[in-house]
């Protein structure tokens, strides 16, 4: 079969049904399906509205669209996100002339290598469930630049994005004139986010670092909670060649007296983080020690979890995302929100379980094992390094029962492409290599050469255009009756996934 397993076979129950009642009822009929049935019906009974519009389309109004494109063009004329001068001098100067907007609200700061955006979305949903107004800043975007700045779970409206840019533009130009280098694309967007959050105003900001931590533009905030998702090798030319070296840069988000929520880490990375926490008198909560995933079961459209937080155990949580990595992200997010509320240190209590369940059931994470088409099933995942690819491969193998899986892969040239392909090799029957439209994309012939070394010549097809690559992969998935349960996974880069999403009609 090509759909997520298992199948939902029953109509939606009375919303007042409890999980325990559903389990008892289902057990009487078919013990093997009891937990699965409960997970499916719990989703329908307890989920609130999904978080906002996760990936907005272009503005419908032509004038607004033209104005947004003009802003995008101006931003694109600055240093891109891959060209860095490691310093917070420029962003600090911008914050100064803007009146320090980043100090107008408390914040939760997220660093790590993989899982940052999904974790940020979960934290945001949890805070919204407790009626706090949130601002979320994440990167990169899947399709629209406005995704990067969210208010109350929804991307900022294009009109407000344009207005925010125009408001800070004179101050940006003032700082540009005073510095050896102009503010970068990412620095200006960071300034826009902090200004928009102060203007809203928000009760709390959830901020994902762009790269590293110490000198990242976001690191002009003093967060009471620092979150570190799993660290692995990525951006090695800028952050270091070992997990410990990379952790040294990322540890810069840990501020004096903060609480650190530490996901499972390589030993050397964990040691660096713990040392930094001691230096600044920060409190550390470690996954697997103070919090973690107690149990997880596959359920319709996601998974059913029991999480152990800082304040106790939270049962019967439906998470509409696939993969063990997302369950671990959920545990990290829950503990971060508990820490924000002082639970585990100042208070010995749990958060309201109903609010927790509704929040997690509403989470969306576009481009993270996201199903965008059926017959054949097409899944998108933004994995762009070996650790992310391994998590995606494990997740798709667990959640789907494909008889044959075709990969569509387009990567950036500055990544560990061989490591990424090796992680996917066991699950791809064939691979179609391609490239996205950005200058950062790896040349398709270079990518094909590496793919042939990993997969063998007979399993590799080359299609320079992404639209042709998608068509070729879908054709391969459909071509023989015996492969009626075949699927397609599009991966390798957030940009590739975003462009594929548009081509497949999800933009």
Image (cartoon, helix red, strand yellow):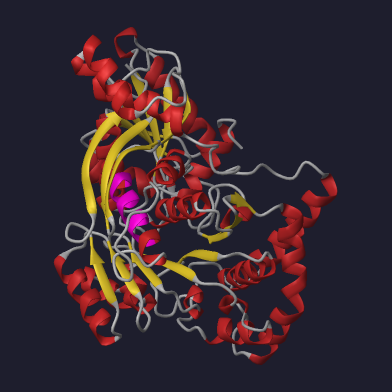
Residue at the extreme left: 267
Quadrant in which the C terminus appears: top right
The percent position of residue 279, horizontal first and vertical second, equals 26, 87
Main SS type for the magenta part? helix
Image quarter for residue 305?
Answer: top left
Q: In this image, 489 relative to 149: left or right?
A: left
| Residue 449 x %, y % | 31, 45
For the point 74% across and 75% down, which residue is it?
Answer: 169
- Residue 7 seen in this snapshot: yes
- Span colored in magenta: 326-336
The image quadrant that residue 349 belongs to is: bottom left
Report x, y in % for residue 270. 20, 70
In the picture as drawn, the residue positioned furthest to the right comes out as 63
**Does the segment drawn in magenta span residue 504?**
no
Tell me where residue 432 sits by quadrant: top left
From what the image shows, is residue 482 above or below residue 383?
Answer: above
The tally of labels here is 0
- Left/right placement of residue 16 relative to residue 323 reads right
Residue in the picture at 23% in, 45% down: 422
Q: Residue at x 73, y 62 (%)?
A: 71
- 91 vs 107, left or right, is right
Residue nearer the viewer, 476 or 285: 285
Q: Nearer the viewer, residue 238 or 206?
A: 206
In the depicted structure, whether residue 107 falls above or below residue 114: below
Whether residue 333 is in magenta: the answer is: yes
In which quadrant is the N terminus drawn? top left
Front residue (pair 355, 405): 355
Residue 313, image x and y in percent?
A: 25, 48
* Direction from residue 248 to residue 136 in the image, left or right: right
Question: Closer to the camera, 363 or 139?
Answer: 363
Q: Is residue 5 visible?
A: no
């Amino acid at each position: 079969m090509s759909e997520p397993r298992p199948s939902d076979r029953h109509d939606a129950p009375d919303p007042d049904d409890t999980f325990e009642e559903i389990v008892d009822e289902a057990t009487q009929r078919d013990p093997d399906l009891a937990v699965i049935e409960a997970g499916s019906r719990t989703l329908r009974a307890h989920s609130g509205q999904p978080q906002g519009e996760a990936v907005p389309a272009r503005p419908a109004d032509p004038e607004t669209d033209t104005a947004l494109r003009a802003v995008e063009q101006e931003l694109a004329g600055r240093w891109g996100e891959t060209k860095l001068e490691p310093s917070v001098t420029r962003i600090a100067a911008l914050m100064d002339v803007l009146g320090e907007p980043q100090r107008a609200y408390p914040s939760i700061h997220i660093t790590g290598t993989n899982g940052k955006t999904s974790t940020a979305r979960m934290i945001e949903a949890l805070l919204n469930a407790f009626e706090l107004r949130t601002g979320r800043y994440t990167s990169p975007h899947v399709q629209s630049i406005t995704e990067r700045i969210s208010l109350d779970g929804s991307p900022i409206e294009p009109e407000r994005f344009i207005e925010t840019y125009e408001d800070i533009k004179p101050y940006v130009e003032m700082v540009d004139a005073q510095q050896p280098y102009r503010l970068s694309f990412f620095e200006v967007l960071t300034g826009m986010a902090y200004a928009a959050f102060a203007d809203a105003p928000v009760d709390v900001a959830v901020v994902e670092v762009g790269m590293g931590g110490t000198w990242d533009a976001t690191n002009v905030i003093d967060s009471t909670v620092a979150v570190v998702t799993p660290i692995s090798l990525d951006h090695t030319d800028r952050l270091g060649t070992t997990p410990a070296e990379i952790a040294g840069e990322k540890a810069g988000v840990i501020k004096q007296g903060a609480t650190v929520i530490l996901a499972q880490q390589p030993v050397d990375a964990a040691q660096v983080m713990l040392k930094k926490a001691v230096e600044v008198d920060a409190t550390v909560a470690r996954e697997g020690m103070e919090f973690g995933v107690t149990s997880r079961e596959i359920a319709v459209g996601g998974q059913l979890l029991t999480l152990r937080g800082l304040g106790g155990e939270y049962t019967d949580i439906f998470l509409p995302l696939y993969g063990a990595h997302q369950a671990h992200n959920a545990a990290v997010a829950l503990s971060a929100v508990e820490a924000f509320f002082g639970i585990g240190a100042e208070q010995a209590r749990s958060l309201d379980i109903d609010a927790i369940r509704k929040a997690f059931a509403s989470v969306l994470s576009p481009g993270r094992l996201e199903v965008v088409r059926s017959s054949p099933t097409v899944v998108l995942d933004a994995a762009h390094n070996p650790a992310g690819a391994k998590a995606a491969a494990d997740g798709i193998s667990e959640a789907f029962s494909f008889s044959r899986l075709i990969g569509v892969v387009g990567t950036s040239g500055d990544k560990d492409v061989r490591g990424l392909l090796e992680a996917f090799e066991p699950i791809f029957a064939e691979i179609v290599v391609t490239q996205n439209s950005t200058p950062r994309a790896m040349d398709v012939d270079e990518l094909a050469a590496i793919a042939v070394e990993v997969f063998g010549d007979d399993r590799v097809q080359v299609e320079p255009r992404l639209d042709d690559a998608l068509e070729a992969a879908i054709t391969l998935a459909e071509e023989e009756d015996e492969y009626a349960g075949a699927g397609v996974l599009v991966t390798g880069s957030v940009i590739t996934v975003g462009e594929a999403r548009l081509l497949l009609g999800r933009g």
